[in-house]
Image (cartoon, helix red, strand yellow):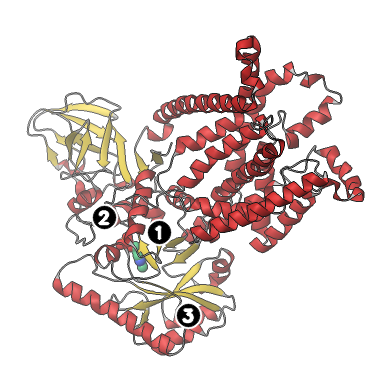
C-alpha cells in the first residue's frame, strides 16, 4: 500500500486553486447575486495565491540554504516562466495600446517589478521577491523573528489593501507607496509571510490532527468572511486580497491538505501552472469567439457559462501542453552529455516507494532516519538527500561532520546525526550547522563538553559490537552526560551487529544486545532522567526485529532497496526496489582469434574466434577488480561475461553471441531489477556486500535521474 508516499493533496489543491483564480477573473456569479459573487471571488478564491506561495515555501525554503542555491534555482525557473509569459501576452498588450501609455519607461519598469504586464502576472515577480525576502529572514533570524518581520510587512500591506479607508491620514502615506506599485499585495508586503509559513510547516509539521485542522480552518474562514463583509459594508476596501484572518485560515488549510498523501501527480502540478498563465488568454479568446456570431453571444453574456467555458478551454489546453512538454523533455534527456560514457541512474520513484514501505513497517510514532553517509551509499548525496527532503524526510544520519555540513549546504532540513567521530575542536561547526554529534565514549563526552560550546548529541551505547559507544555498564558516565552544561542530549542509541542473521546463536546474541540497552534505559528512568529519543534498528534491525518500537529507524541499505547479500535473513516481507543502476556503453568492438589473450596479465585466452566489446568502466569507477573473468553485464537483454582483468578505466566483455550489439549500445552492470545483476548478487560474486559495492561507486560517475520528469 502506497499510502504515505507523496503530498497528493497539494497537487489536487493546486488544480482547485487554479480554477478559483479563473473565478476571480470571470465573476461566475456576477449576474446572479452580488454578495454571493463577492464571497466566491473575493473571499473563498483569495486562498489560491497564498496557497501557491506557501507551496513554494514548503518545498523550497530552507534556513540551511546557506549559499541560496535552492532559491536561485527557484528564481531562475520563475524568471524564465515570467519572460515567456510576458512575450506570450505581448500581442494582447499591443492590441490594448499598452505601449502607447504615458511615461512608458517608468511604468514599464513598475509593471515588470511589481504589477505584471498583464493583470495576473504580478504573481511571478512577487514569488521571486517574496521567496528572496523570506529566505533572508529565516537565514538571518529564527522563525519567530521571520514571522514578526514578514507579519509587519503584511500589516503594512493590509492598510493599502482591504483596510485602506480605515484612516485618512494613513491613506496619505500610502500615496508614496502607490507611486512605486499599484497594489500592496505584492512581493514585499504580501508574499513573504506565506513563504515563511510554508517553510515553517515543512520543518515543524510532524503529525497534526486532521479534525483539528479542519476546525481551525472552518473557524478562521468564518472570521475572515465576517471580516471581509464588514470591510465591504464600511466601504473602506481599495483592493480585496489581504485579510487578517487569511493568515490562520491558510495555516490550517495547508496542514489539512498535507494529510492527503498518495501518488505524486506531476502532470497536475504542471497543468495548474499552465492554467494560471494562460487563462486570461482564454478569456480573451472566448470573448472573440462569442463576438463572431450572435448564436455564441451567450458565452460571454452568461457569466456562469463564460466561467465554465474558460475553465474547460484552459484545462484542455494545459493538458495538451503538458503532454508535449513531457515529450520534449524526454527527448532532451536521451541526448544528455552525462550518459555518453558510464553513469549511475537513480530511480527516485523507487526511492519514494521504499521510504513509504519502510514507514508503513514502522510504528506510527517512529520516524525514518535516512542514512545518507558516503554519498548516500554511492547513489549521489545531493540527488538523494534533496529528494528525501522534498518528500518530507526530516531525520538523517551521516558518518562525518563534513557530510553533515554538505547536507546543510544543500538546504536539507531536520535532524542530522553524525554517527562517527568528530574532532572536538570543531564543536563550533556542529553548532553553527545545527548538527547532532554521537558521543562515542565517556572521555569524548567530557572533551566535547569542555569546549564550552553547547551542542546537541546522542549517546551511543556499546551492547556487544565493541566498536563505538559507552559500555552498557557505565551507568554513571551515561547519567553524567545528561547534566553536562554544554551538551544537550537529544537521543540515545545502540547498534546491532548480527541482526541480518537468522542463526539461533546470532538471534540470542541480538536479543541480549536489545535487553542490555533497555536495562540501561530502565536504570536511567529510575534515576529520574527523562529519556530522549531512542533508536536501535538499522535496515536489518527493522526487517528482522520489527516489534521494537523506537523513535527512529536508521535505514541505509533498505532505503536504497537492496539486500547486503542475497541470502540475508528478512522476516518482514517488504517490497523494496533497487534505486540504482550502473550503465555504460560499448565504445569499441574488436575480433580476437582463438588463442589470443585479452587484458593485463593475459589472464584470459580465447578458446575460439570471438568478438569482444570494450566498456569504458573499471575499478576506478567502482567495479571490483575481483569480477575479472567472473562477472557479467547485460547488453540488449543478453548476458555478456567479463573477460580478462578489470582495468582502472575499462573492461572487456565477450559479445560473440550477441549478434546485434553495436557501438553505442547500453550495457547494464548493476540493474535496478531484482535479477542476477542486482547489487547483492554482483557483490557476492565479488566477495563483498552491496553496501561496499555501492558506496565505492560514484566518485567519478555522473548521476542521472530516471523517472523524475
Ligand atoms: C551505516 C549505519 C547504519 C545503516 O545501516 P544499514 O544496514 O545500511 O541500514 C545504521 N546505524 C549505524 C550506526 C551505521 O553506521
**Above or below, 29 relative to 428:** above
Q: Nearer the viewer, residue 264 or 422?
A: 264
Closer to the eye: label 3 or 1: 1
Closer to the eye: label 2 or 3: 2
Asked if one can make out residue 616 in the rendered structure from this viewpoint, the answer is: no
**Where is mark 3, residue-wise?**
445
Q: Gap in Å between the C-alphas at discs 3 and 1?
A: 25 Å
Q: Residue at x 44, y 64 (%)?
A: 400
**Above or below, 265 relative to 626:** above
Tell whether label 1 touches label 2 (CB within 8 Å). no
Asked if one can make out residue 665 in the rendered structure from this viewpoint, the answer is: yes
User: How many numbered callouts?
Assistant: 3
Tell whether label 1 touches label 3 (CB within 8 Å). no
Q: Residue 457: percent from the left, percent from the top? A: 48, 73
**Where is mark 1, residue-wise?**
370
Q: Gap in Å between the C-alphas at discs 2 and 1?
A: 17 Å
SS for tag 3?
helix
Q: Residues within 10 Å of mark 2 (few under 14, many from 20)?
A: some
Q: Residue at x 29, y 64 (%)?
A: 542
Q: Residue 687: percent from the left, percent from the top? A: 19, 55
Q: Which numbered tag is attached to residue 574? A: 2
Amino acid at each position: 500500500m502506497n499510502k504515505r508516499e507523496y503530498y497528493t493533496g497539494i497537487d489536487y489543491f493546486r488544480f482547485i486553486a487554479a480554477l478559483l483564480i479563473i473565478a476571480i477573473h470571470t465573476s461566475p456569479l456576477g449576474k446572479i447575486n452580488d454578495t454571493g459573487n463577492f464571497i466566491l471571488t473575493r473571499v473563498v478564491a483569495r486562498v489560491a495565491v497564498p496557497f501557491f506561495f506557501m507551496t513554494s515555501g514548503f518545498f523550497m525554503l530552507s534556513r540551511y540554504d546557506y549559499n541560496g542555491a535552492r532559491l536561485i534555482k527557484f528564481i531562475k525557473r520563475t524568471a524564465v516562466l515570467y519572460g515567456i509569459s510576458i512575450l506570450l501576452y505581448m500581442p494582447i498588450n499591443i492590441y490594448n495600446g499598452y505601449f502607447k501609455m504615458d511615461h512608458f519607461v517608468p511604468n514599464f519598469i513598475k509593471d515588470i517589478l511589481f504589477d505584471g504586464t498583464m493583470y495576473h502576472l504580478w504573481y511571478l515577480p512577487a514569488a521571486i521577491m517574496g521567496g528572496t525576502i523570506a529566505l533572508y529572514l529565516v537565514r538571518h533570524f529564527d522563525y519567530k523573528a521571520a514571522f514578526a518581520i514578514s507579519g509587519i510587512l503584511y500589516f503594512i500591506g493590509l492598510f493599502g489593501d482591504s483596510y485602506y479607508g480605515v484612516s485618512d491620514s494613513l491613506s496619505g502615506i500610502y500615496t508614496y507607496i502607490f507611486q512605486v506599485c499599484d497594489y500592496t499585495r505584492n512581493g514585499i508586503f504580501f508574499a513573504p509571510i506565506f513563504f515563511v509559513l510554508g517553510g515553517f510547516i515543512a520543518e515543524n509539521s510532524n503529525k497534526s490532527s486532521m479534525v483539528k485542522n479542519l476546525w481551525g480552518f472552518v473557524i478562521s474562514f468564518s472570521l475572515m468572511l465576517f471580516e471581509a463583509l464588514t470591510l465591504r459594508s464600511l466601504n473602506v476596501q481599495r483592493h480585496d486580497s489581504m485579510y487578517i484572518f487569511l493568515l490562520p485560515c491558510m495555516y490550517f488549510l495547508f496542514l489539512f491538505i498535507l494529510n492527503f498523501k498518495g501518488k505524486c501527480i506531476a502532470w497536475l502540478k504542471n497543468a495548474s501552472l499552465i492554467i494560471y498563465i494562460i487563462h486570461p488568454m482564454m478569456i480573451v479568446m472566448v470573448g472573440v469567439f462569442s463576438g463572431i456570431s450572435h448564436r455564441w453571444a451567450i458565452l460571454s453574456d452568461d457569466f456562469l457559462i463564460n466561467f465554465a467555458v474558460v475553465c474547460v478551454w484552459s484545462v484542455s489546453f494545459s493538458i495538451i501542453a503538458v503532454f508535449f512538454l513531457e515529450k520534449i523533455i524526454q527527448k532532451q534527456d536521451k541526448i544528455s552529455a552525462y550518459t555518453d560514457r558510464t553513469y549511475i541512474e537513480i530511480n527516485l520513484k523507487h526511492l519514494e516507494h521504499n521510504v513509504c514501505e519502510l514507514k508503513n513497517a514502522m510504528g506510527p510514532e517512529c520516524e525514518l532516519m535516512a542514512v545518507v553517509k558516503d554519498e548516500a551509499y554511492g547513489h549521489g548525496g545531493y540527488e538523494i538527500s534533496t529528494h528525501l527532503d522534498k518528500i518530507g524526510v526530516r531525520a538523517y544520519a551521516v558518518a562525518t561532520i563534513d557530510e553533515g555540513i554538505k547536507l546543510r549546504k544543500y538546504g536539507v532540513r531536520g535532524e542530522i546525526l553524525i554517527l562517527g567521530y568528530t574532532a572536538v575542536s570543531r564543536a563550533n561547526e556542529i553548532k553553527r550547522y545545527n548538527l547532532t554529534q554521537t558521543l562515542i565514549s565517556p572521555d569524548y563526552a567530557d572533551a566535547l563538553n569542555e569546549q564550552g560550546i553547547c551542542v546537541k548529541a546522542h549517546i551511543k551505547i556499546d551492547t556487544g559490537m565493541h566498536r563505538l559507544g559507552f559500555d552498557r555498564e557505565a551507568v554513571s558516565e551515561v547519567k553524567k552526560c545528561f547534566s553536562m552544561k554544554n551538551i544537550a542530549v537529544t537521543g540515545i542509541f545502540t547498534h546491532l551487529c548480527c541482526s541480518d542473521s537468522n542463526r539461533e546463536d546470532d538471534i540470542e546474541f541480538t536479543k541480549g544486545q536489545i535487553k542490555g540497552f533497555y536495562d540501561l534505559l530502565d536504570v536511567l528512568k529510575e534515576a529520574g532522567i527523562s529519556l530522549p529519543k531512542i533508536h536501535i534498528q538499522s535496515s536489518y534491525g527493522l526487517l528482522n526485529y520489527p516489534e521494537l518500537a523506537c523513535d527512529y529507524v536508521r535505514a541505509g541499505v533498505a532505503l536504497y532497496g537492496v539486500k547486503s547479500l542475497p541470502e540475508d535473513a528478512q522476516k518482514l516481507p517488504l517490497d523494496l526496489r533497487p534505486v540504482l543502476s550502473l550503465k555504460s556503453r560499448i565504445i569499441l568492438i574488436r575480433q580476437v582469434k582463438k588463442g589470443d589473450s585479452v587484458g593485463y596479465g593475459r589472464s584470459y585466452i580465447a578458446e575460439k574466434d570471438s568478438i569482444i566489446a570494450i566498456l569504458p568502466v573499471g575499478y576506478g569507477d567502482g567495479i571490483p577488480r575481483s569480477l575479472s573473468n567472473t562477472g557479467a553485464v547485460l547488453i540488449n537483454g543478453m548476458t555478456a561475461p567479463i573477460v580478462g582483468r578489470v582495468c582502472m578505466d575499462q573492461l572487456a566483455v565477450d559479445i560473440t553471441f550477441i549478434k546485434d550489439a553495436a557501438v553505442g549500445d547500453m550495457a547494464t552492470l548493476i540493474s535496478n531489477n531484482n535479477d542476477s545483476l542486482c547489487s547483492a548478487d554482483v557483490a557476492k560474486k565479488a566477495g563483498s556486500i552491496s553496501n561496499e559495492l555501492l558506496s565505492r561507486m560514484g566518485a567519478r560517475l555522473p548521476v542521472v535521474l530516471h523517472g523524475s520528469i
